[in-house]
Amino acid sequence: MKIKNICCIGAGYVGGPTMAIIAQKSPEITVTVVDINEKRIAAWNDEDVNNIPIYEPGLADVVAEARGRNLFFSTDVDKAIDEADMIFISVNTPTKTYGIGKGMAADLKYIELCARQIARVAKTDKIVVEKSTLPVRTAEALKNILDNTGNGVNFQILSNPEFLAEGTAVSDLHKPDRVLIGGDLDTDEGKEAIQALVDVYAHWVTKDNILTTNVWSSELSKLTANAFLAQRVSSINALSELCEQTGADIKEVAKAIGMDSRIGPKFLQASVGFGGSCFQKDILNLVYIAKSFGLNEVADYWEQVIIMNDHQKRRFAAKMVKTLYNTVSGKKIALLGWAFKKDTNDTRESAAIYVADYLLIEQAELVIYDPKVNKEQILADLDCLGTRSEEENRANITVVNNAMDAANDAHAIAIMTEWDEFKALDWEQVYNDMLKPAFLFDGRRLLDRHELEAIGFEFYAIGS
Ligand code: NAD
Ligand code: UDX
């Protein structure tokens, strides 16, 4: 079976870039990305390709190449479902904020809505692909809804989790370590559906890098991969605190252990804590699944990764307060960076939000700058926490358009995101513009201690 028409429901950080690459690499397949968010779709269709809603290095070029040729963005979800032979579900699956499993389980309401809509609209057989990250055995629920509320057509469900990381989405998609496809290996129809998706990726991914498994292994592998990656960050962050007490330097420790080929060098960068829309949500989801099977030790084991991460964010902010003579009340503090990592405009679960909240509780005046995040987003992130009123947030926060403006008359600066431009700042001028003593807190191990101390900064870096 050859796929001619793909629909993707959800034009977010995963749906947008993933479909743009499929369209780029498969000119004979028509790819339509749909979303209920009209503003987002309008931005994807903006004449100026630099205004697409998601910032990823290289993405604008890919969209410019494929958009209007075989890549389309639309709000007409029904039409796209109707015309497609393969439908990717790439909607958000945030942590539940209500009811049973509140604060832990994945909220599957958007997934279920998609399934019901597909069932209602589909008049021909479809392959439905889970692209969103889902709890193991969600495909069973999807199949139930599709088969029981559909028009008698056949649905094959595949799991095809996405492993791209934000900030490197285009290169991750162009050269994935592996593509994982889970499906029904016991039936001919299941195997045919798997092959159809393998053929899509085979346009640019070698066969050896396309792994096929049963659906449950695929679903669980995605949560597992994120849990393992986040665990490495929490492990190195746990040791960073010990380094600060002992004179060891976490960067040197990371290098020394990372050269052990069994450990490897990646994901050993100590930081103010991991952020992003995936790690916390997916581990909480794993913890919830383990608990629901009565596996309390398993649940506790993974939950510790989150506990460590929360501790690291709090600890960083507390260190700032302590260093600034135990009070930041009324002091101007500059935060450089708001995104959860560099090269993305995504701020979900960014450590900066929590550090800012902590400092605001201590009555600091914050001046914030991020190269790709605007004022509305920063304020919305803080409003969402609900710690204080919207008026109070606006009264105590200034958002500026460059790092130099943030530094002006500040008591302290904290690096929250490792944007390259912060490395390249004229730190001598920054120092001159600040109140003295000028405190600099590096939450990303971005800067060189010796250079900054030579300028005159009181310098603090995570893990040394
Ligand atoms: P996102 O919030 O950026 O995008 C989801 C989009 O789906 C939104 O634009 C929303 O309007 C749309 N949507 C929701 N319900 C809809 C409906 N019924 N019909 C049409 N559109 C609908 O989310 P994301 O970051 O792209 O993540 C999507 C999924 O991919 C999640 O399950 C996430 O865990 C997973 N994932 C994310 C990443 C990442 O780095 N962001 C990486 C791998 C996997
Ligand atoms: C993650 C997974 O890497 C990706 O495979 C999955 O598909 C989605 O979730 P993402 O959240 O986009 O991707 O970014 P990632 O590069 O994993 O970073 C997550 C967080 O960990 C960031 O806040 C990052 O700054 C932090 N991090 C990462 C560290 O603090 N230290 C490290 O060594 C690596």
Image (cartoon, grey):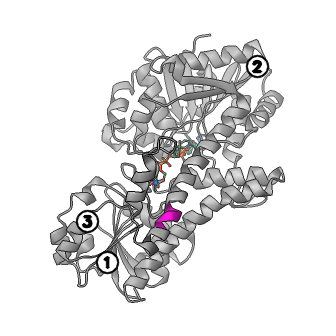
Residue kind at label 2, given as amino acid type: Val
Residue kind at label 3, given as amino acid type: Ala
Residue beneath the point at 46% across and 65% down: 240
The residue identified by callout 2 is 153
Q: Label 2: how many residues lie within 10 Å, few (<14), some (14-19) or many (20+)?
A: few
In this view, the mark in front (2 or 1): 1
Q: CA distance from mark 3 to mark 2?
A: 57 Å
- Residue 143 located left or right of residue 347: right
Depth check: 289 or 108 in front? Answer: 289
The residue identified by callout 1 is 412
Q: Mark 2 falls on what kind of element?
A: loop
- Image quadrant in which you'd find residue 212: top right
Q: Is residue 380 magenta?
A: no
In this view, the mark in front (3 or 2): 3
Q: CA distance from mark 2 to mark 1?
A: 63 Å
Question: Disc 2, ligand 1: is the CB inside 8 Å?
Answer: no
Q: Mark 3 falls on what kind of element?
A: helix
The x and y percentages for residue 201 are 51, 21
In which quadrant is the N terminus drawn?
Answer: top right
- Residue 433, compared with residue 58, is above or below; it is below
